[in-house]
Amino acid sequence: MSTEHDPGAAPGLFQIEEPDAGAPKRRAAGLGIGIDLGTTHSLVAIAPHGAPPRVLEDEAGRALLPSVVAYVTDPPRVGAEALALQVEHPDRVLSSVKRFMGRAPSDIDEPIPYALGERPGDDGRVVRFDVGGRLVTPAEVSARILEVLVARAETALGAKPDGAVITVPAYFDEAQRKATKDAARIAGIEVYRLLAEPTAAALAYGLDRSEQGVFVVFDLGGGTFDVSVLRLDKGVFQVLATAGDTHLGGDDFDRVLAEHLLRAAKVETPSKHVRAEALAAARAVKHALTTQPVAAATLPRAGLEGFEVTREAFEAMIRPVLGRLRAPARRALADAGVEKDEIDGVVLVGGATRVPAVKRLAERLFGRPPLDDIDPDQVVAQGAAIQADILSGNPREGVTLLDVVPLSLGVETMGGLVETIVPRNAPIPIRARQVFTNYSEEQTGMTIHVVQGEREMAADCRSLARFELSGIPRLPPSMARVEVSFQVDADGLLTVTARELMTGVSQTVEVKPTYGLSDDEVERLVLDSLDHADEDFEARDRAEARVELDRVCTAVRRALAADGDDAALLPPDERRAVAAALEEAAAALGDPARPAGELRRLRERLEAESEPFARRRMERALAERMAGRRVAEVERAVGDAKALDERRGGHHPTMTPPAPATE
Amino acid sequence: MTPTPQSVQPVPEPGPGPSAPEDARRGVVITARAAKVMRDQLVKRGTPDAAIRFGIRGGGCTGYSYVFQFEDRPPRAHDRVFEKNGVRVCVDPKSMRLLEGTVIDFETGIRGHGFRFENPNVREHCGCGESVSF
């Protein structure tokens, strides 16, 4: 789009260009991969150029890479090889480090099974594992796992992937997300986006293709249990609530069954190896019982041969563990404010959901048969792969990604005007913010009306979202500070956050500005703004003049109410003049057709008539306040006020107060 | 490959400006030299009857940049069309607010050759010479 100068052309001189296609720029297609970086195991999947997602296996045909890194050799070993070293070197083989991502040692309320170390300057902010004198962070350990997965993808794709979508639990906070991104950076892979695990699972099932809905993702992994309630609206999934148990999973089934096997073998104090053997046998029996009614276990070391376990007996054994799944499931629904009959779908995630008793429980808890036709171990990675393919620029089922914001994004301010925050054609991802202020002292809330388009008046733009920020402290007009930030991420998702800077109270909303927006409509909206430029500028001019006049009227009325009867401040003849000017201004405000010039003249007149009154009030207030204070103090106070004013600088548009409840 | 996040400053929209009487506005002026080069380039392109689209759009390092390209479609209903020696230059009303009084000239010399826009509304040029602020 920028001018390609002839080599001979000088700066500031232009050539006639060929017309551009007009359509917004599409991102060049690349190779994206999806990674499920799990607590117990991790996976990588690809879905290149719109193909169905495919989880990649290692040379031995294994899709699941145990999330285990062994710092026994240099370089460290990862996965099954590392796991094999765990019994011999328990202190140098790290597993389940996801639990420590982005956490400080003091955040962790469970015993840490590894020795920790500290580097000068850490200040106790980061966990470092001491593996034989070498210090590694959870992000570094995760990076080793990511490297193996990226290499696996590179082999399958025949080229280095351009970027990855990595899944994280929905409840991960900023620090935990940052640690995950750090891991990717260390591993040398670009992160297109971190994606919530339940959202990934929903994407794998194509649930985003419906217009809207409420979905439950029931994720029972090896050692963690998460229930998430998602709401889909206009192409955006929002996690309404999550609940779970960070120490509950399929491993608990294995433990219960292993103890049962050891009791059957009459082993009271099993050695490390006998216990490992019993756990392996329990796992095999558990797997077998997902498809058959009876399975046999053999523990050579413990002297148990062909011991039969029925599915019924197994289910009776794990009943107490199953019981612990109920409370988080109910809590998630309650927190989301969702009734059982509002649920449109239930998705099963995690290997332990293969256990028939778990499936039945999920069906009872949520009142509908769960979706289980995608391998529950792979569903999250598959969803991540689909998202990665889209983010890498491949068109897919009508989803297209742009490099730029196709239409300006802004908010409505007083008078129905639009304040643009992200201009049209800004490259994404992008973050922008603008500070807004209050209109009057009574205003303790603000309506944030997010709009899209090129027109000057909000009513002529597309309305994307509207929400309220309440709890703004009572402050004189133009003194409150509300920061509105717009963030458009790589796939065009817009997050709007409004934050009151004094109290920190904030509200956030997520929308997809391109939802339901065709190229034709973008063009129409842009051309509309060109065609209506003159009337738009006029409307803006008039609305601004109106807001200003109204502001001055309010201030004068307030002053009159306070000191209007004090003849020393406001002599009767002045008072009559002010009242007349005020009356005329009020009449003009009541008439929407008044031109901007007249509104401005009325404001100037009202300001001129009330200026002596305002000056006398100010002088009296100063005299009262300064009485008894030294000159230096006064000077400092004046200086502070000036500095404050300078710091505020610029313009701070005022935002509409929330509409009365009757509307 | 992916653009890095950046912050933007809201660009203040130009105000209503001095309200000169309608007939005193010159619109966009094309010099005879510029018209001749446009004519030659339109003929060379094989579209002697096409027009030139002149405008301003958002973007560029100081907020706005010029649009200057061949226009194969007929002028839109609200466009203003300026003609010089048979060459038509179309300007949309929004751009017109920022282009009022602009002279389009053509320069040749040791500095190179190209069209020059003398725009009285411009406050500053950026280093690249392509974007302007008002």
Image: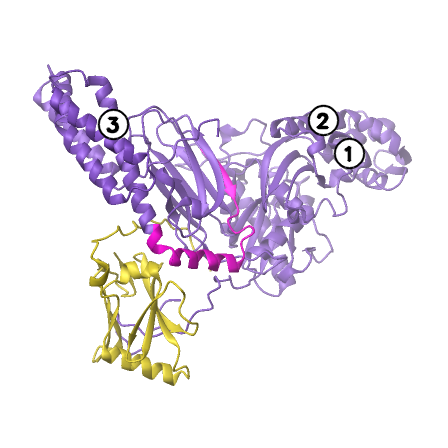
Chain colours: A purple, B yellow
Going by the numbered disc 2, the residue's amino acid type is Arg
- Front: mark 1 or 2: 1
Q: Is residue A300 magenta?
A: no
Question: What amino acid is labelled 3 in the image?
Answer: Ala
Whether residue A327 can be seen here: yes
Mark 2 belongs to chain: A
Label 3, on which residue? A555
User: Alpha-carbon neighbours of circle 1 within 10 Å: few (<14), some, or many (≥20)?
Assistant: some
Q: Which mark is residue A305?
A: none
Q: CA distance from mark 3 to mark 2?
A: 59 Å
Residue A551: x percent and y percent?
A: 27, 32
Say which residue label 1 marks.
Answer: A363
Q: Which mark is residue A326?
A: 2
Q: Horizontally, is A314 left or right of B6 in the view?
A: right
Q: Is residue A134 above or below residue B107?
A: above
Q: Is residue A524 magenta?
A: yes
Q: Position of residue A306 (x, y in %)?
A: 91, 37
The chain to which mark 3 is attached is A
Task: Residue A214: give x, y in percent of width and height.
Answer: 65, 37
Residue A114 in the image: above or below residue B61: above
